[in-house]
Amino acid sequence: MNKRTIFAALFAAATMGLSAQKPMTAPAGGKAISDELIGIFFEDINNSADGGLYAELVQNGSFEFSPVERDGWGPGTAWRLSRPGHSTGWMEPRMDNSIHPNNPTYMRLHIERVKEYYDYTGWKGFGLQNDGFDGISVKAGEKYDFSAFLRNFGDAKKVRVALVEQLPGWPPKDPKLLAEAVIDVTDNGWKKYEAVLTPDSTCRKASLMMLVLNVGDLDVDMVSLMPENTYKGHGLRKDLAQALADLQPKFLRFPGGCVVHGGGDGFWNTYRWKTTIGPKEQRKQMKNTWGYHQSMSLGYFEYFQFCEDLGMEPVPILPAGVSCQGANGGWNMWPTQAQDACPMEAMDEWVAEAIDLIEWANGDPATNKWAKMRADQGHPKPFNLKYLGIGNEEKISPEFIERFKYIYERVTKAYPEIVIVGTAGPGSHAGNPDYEAGWKLANELGMPILDEHYYEQNDYFLNKRQYDNYPRGGNTKVYLGEYAAKDKKLIDALAEGLYLLHVERNADVVSMTSYAPLFARKDGTQWNPDMIYYDNERPFLTCSYYVQQLFGQSSGNYYYGDCVKFEGDAPDACQPMENVHYGQSVVLNTKTRQLFVKLCNASGEAKKANIDLSRFGLKKLATKTVLSGNADDENNYEAQPIAPKTEQIKAQKKFSVDLAPYSFVMLKYAL
């Protein structure tokens, strides 16, 4: 073996050692905690799926919008008739002989005359135009996959598909052509046609035109325009998915939220996972709880695939046989609605909903029909589902308890290895009757995890330390599944961070947390605040996003409470305390051999923290990340003044850190 080969082998071994170190033994004084503490929760609220995380650029591509969802909506919503050269004809929504019963509505184009006229030289045809979600944003040189299901009548037809930029002025001008393709439509039955469009220039507000160039009739359905450059090629908008990946979340809870059980609409609008898998043209679209439309293009397969792409545990939430809380049930969003309940004689359907999902996610395609559906969609290997939520912040009524028990007992008997996540109802604080009833039920059943939700002013997160008083030694852990301070300023994010320091200290009781809501589209927002705002061009990351990111980057499995002391505190003070607006947490990850020191100062006065890390074998260098600003600073569409700053520093075992007012500091060490 020559010297070059020996050097290469030694270098490879050293590199492998850096990326795959052996786990270490935790030094004395630590407390074992959950290493799945920081996750994310996705609900299709604020137009988060279509026109958001899912990268589809055409709105209402299947003509399924309904007036039930929003006044004035219908099959033609988001579409315009296009007839350059004064071509003539009309369009007609129909539901006979559709592609699939789950997707009944399509558009029939009747083309009477096609001609060129006036300034539209070179442009002719009769058809449709879609402007996407407040315009279609395309980039020069990037490829966009067009597809549509078409059904021809009579002679073959040519369909011109074009990305265009509409130019202002009068008389009307030719639209600027960005990309085009011509499709020959010959089949007299439904057939999927495809083309690739590559714009020659960038446009922030393009439109998609489909122009039929021959007279006669043509049926159109499932029109789609997808960028080829999606996250890992799995159909999610790359920048939004990357923003989630940068959080380093340990799990994803989906698909809601009130979306799970119909929200204010009642139980009829309950989310059914089985109609969100398989080919897109066979999925059943539905009214969204928040008033708009769900295409279900982002369905259960895509959620599970995204979990696999990011290394997250999937945490699907299924209905418990009752609808959202009714009068006096929590947030009072639907004060006149009673809680609907499925008849007990029909509850086996909801048991099957859970068991079939487990088999779809984990089963063998050779022996299980649901697992075969997963394999047919392109994923023969199991998704290894571990968690399953039943219910979402319902009023813990006698009807809910009876139905939850019915599902819980049968699912745990069939699949005892699945960890069932229950619900503590809306407003999860001591004294709330639903909270008390939820915990009573959890203790009775020996439930593994109970999901708590609460949204509060920042004063609560600054001053309260709810989990310090939770009993130890019980069977049921806490999942803080929805929480947020009710604004998006830096002080709100620091209040959340201070509260998370207390959660980390209690992570032997609290095993999972997720901020909510996750996404909000500009000019399409129903709920504030949210973690990530966005438009067609980019995401806008809030102060809360950066706090969540720091905690996601610093997960571990041991907590040390005696390594940091703030000057002026009593010697035995354990931070963060109630009504004290600063605090600390030291977390060790024995698997990655990393140590994290987190310091939060949510007060208007500077603080000094004295740190002793003598028990840990530190490498020579460390990184220091600081998030700081003024209390009322806020990241929004106009300005983003708050972002973390990171530098490399010399690692020391005993030292002090000065904390500026309204700041968060994280120190990261290799061991």
Image (spheres, grey):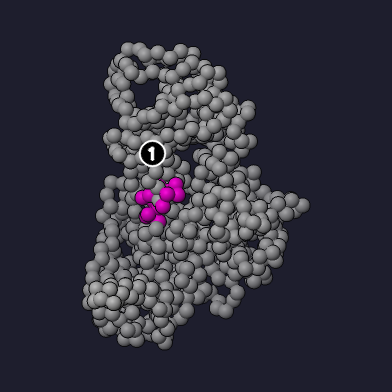
Residue 392 lies in the magenta stretch: no
**Residue at 48%, 32% in the rendered image:** 193
Please indicate whether residue 254 sits to the left or right of residue 20 in the image: right
Q: Name the spot of residue 565 as percent of width and height, x first.
A: 32, 81
> What secondary structure do most residues of the magenta stretch adopt?
helix
Q: Amino acid at mark 1?
A: Tyr
| Total numbered badges shown on the rendered structure | 1
**Residue at 28%, 35% in the rendered image:** 201
Front residue of 213/92: it is 213
Please indicate whether residue 451 sits to the left or right of residue 534 in the image: right
**Residue at 61%, 48% in the rendered image:** 274
Residue 243 lies in the magenta stretch: yes
- As drawn, 87 above or below 46: above
Q: Secondary structure at mark 1?
A: strand
Q: Which residues are magenta?
A: 232-244
Quarter of the C terminus within the rendering:
bottom left
- As drawn, 340 above or below 421: above
Front residue of 214/242: it is 214
Q: Name the spot of residue 462 as percent of width and height, x first.
A: 39, 66
Q: Name the spot of residue 167 as percent of width and height, x first.
A: 29, 25
- Label 1, on which residue? 144
Q: Name the spot of residue 401 as percent of width and height, x first.
A: 68, 60
**Residue at 53%, 44% in the rendered image:** 296
Quarter of the N terminus within the rendering:
bottom left
Query: Within the image, what quadrant is residue 515 found in?
Result: bottom left
- Is any atom of residue 75 visible in this view? no
